[in-house]
Amino acid sequence: MTALLGISKAAAECGVSERSLRYYEEIGLLSPAGKTPGGLRRYSVEDLDRVRRIRQLQSLLGLNLDEIRVLLESEDRLDFIRQEIKAAGPSSARRRALLDEGLAVRQAMAATVDAKLARLREFRQEIGAMIGRIEQLLDEEKVTSP
Amino acid sequence: MTALLGISKAAAECGVSERSLRYYEEIGLLSPAGKTPGGLRRYSVEDLDRVRRIRQLQSLLGLNLDEIRVLLESEDRLDFIRQEIKAAGPSSARRRALLDEGLAVRQAMAATVDAKLARLREFRQEIGAMIGRIEQLLDEEKVTSP
DNA sequence: TTGCTCCTCACGTCACGTGAGGTGGC
DNA sequence: TTGCTCCTCACGTCACGTGAGGTGGC
């Protein structure tokens, strides 16, 4: 088993500030796996994964922390279902409903990402074209004034 | 010639708030093409293009308004050079320096966009894999409980 | 005159940044 | 005891959102 990390190591490990970790806790987005009797926060590897996930959703999708909270709750439910299925728990309408919900959420995310990818590719093309034009201008400069 | 737009039309045209337009002006990022004697802002099509550019750089590259200001200044200089060249102005070391600068800026932007594209594609793959897993679980549900 | 658009303060918000001052285990 | 890490206020910042109250041309 890996030991729990103090807040400074945890923050460094996932490239965020200590303030961010405390803030996520303040708004109920992430609670550290434990606290020492003295009140020091201790983070598990799962906590770190969650922080990295938060950052990914912020930077890649531009979601705010409220939207991320909703998404993470859906992911937590999906994880729970997977545990249940592994334990050969009984199938149920609730389970199918949760799976359907998880599927819908992912499909919406996929659509968002696809749209963003399209916009980014277009943007990249424009930059490439601009680079070409500048290089041509530089070439002409060399020709007209050797 | 197209007439200048009032702030509400201008804002609607590029999908931003009036407050944003006033804020960009407040920090010297965008000044409307004109003001009426009564102090009403009038925006030109170039102004609208600039606003759309600001939004693009914010949403696609995640730049803050200070970084965007620097970039726009570089773009303004490039536009100026192009005007000069069109007017058959004399070649100069200054002009080559400005072109070199413009090229470097674009190449840096291209690298940033490429990195972001790579991260987004990876993210998209993960979502796709997750969708596949959920669909499989749903299939198994149907098999075990008809 | 009545709407409508626009104006300038000015305070609020979100996601933190940044000290100030104090606690707690090697 | 001395460092070092960590703690909790609490105010600051960036990019606006959101009224409050007033002006100005059809």
Image (cartoon, coloured by chain):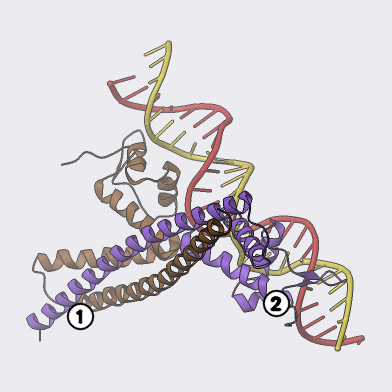
Chain colours: A brown, B purple, C red, D yellow
Total numbered labels: 2
Q: Position of residue A60 (x, y in %)?
A: 39, 62
Q: Are marks 2 and 1 in contact (CB under 8 Å)?
A: no
Query: Circle 2 sits on which residue?
Result: B8
Q: Residue type at mark 2: give it.
A: Ser
On-image quarter of the N terminus of chain B: bottom right
Asked whether residue A61 appears in the rendered view, the answer is: yes
Determine whether, in the image, residue A62 is placed left or right of residue A142.
Answer: left
Asked whether residue A40 appears in the rendered view, the answer is: no
As displayed, is residue A22 above or below residue B121? above
Q: Is mark 1 on a helix, strand or loop?
A: helix
Residue at coordinates 53% horizontally, 59% vertically from top-left?
Answer: A143
As displayed, is residue B32 above or below residue D15? below
Q: Position of residue A135 (x, y in %)?
A: 49, 60
Nearest the eye: B5 or A31? B5
Query: Circle 1 sits on which residue?
Result: A93
Nearest the eye: D10 or A120? A120
Determine whether, in the image, residue A26 is placed left or right of residue A89.
Answer: right
Q: Position of residue C10 (x, y in %)?
A: 75, 56
Determine whether, in the image, residue B130 is placed left or right of residue A15.
Answer: left
Residue at coordinates 59% horizontally, 75% vertically from top-left?
Answer: B15
On-image quarter of the C terminus of chain B: bottom left
Residue A101, numbered label: none
Nearest the eye: A34 or B14? B14
Res. A39 image quadrant: top left
Q: What chain does mark 2 sit on?
A: B
Q: Is mark 2 on a helix, strand or loop?
A: helix
How packed mark 1 is, by other alpha carbons closer than 10 Å (few <14, some 14-19, many 20 or more), is: few
Q: Position of residue B138 (x, y in %)?
A: 17, 78
As displayed, is residue B130 above or below residue A29? below
Q: Residue type at mark 1: give it.
A: Ala
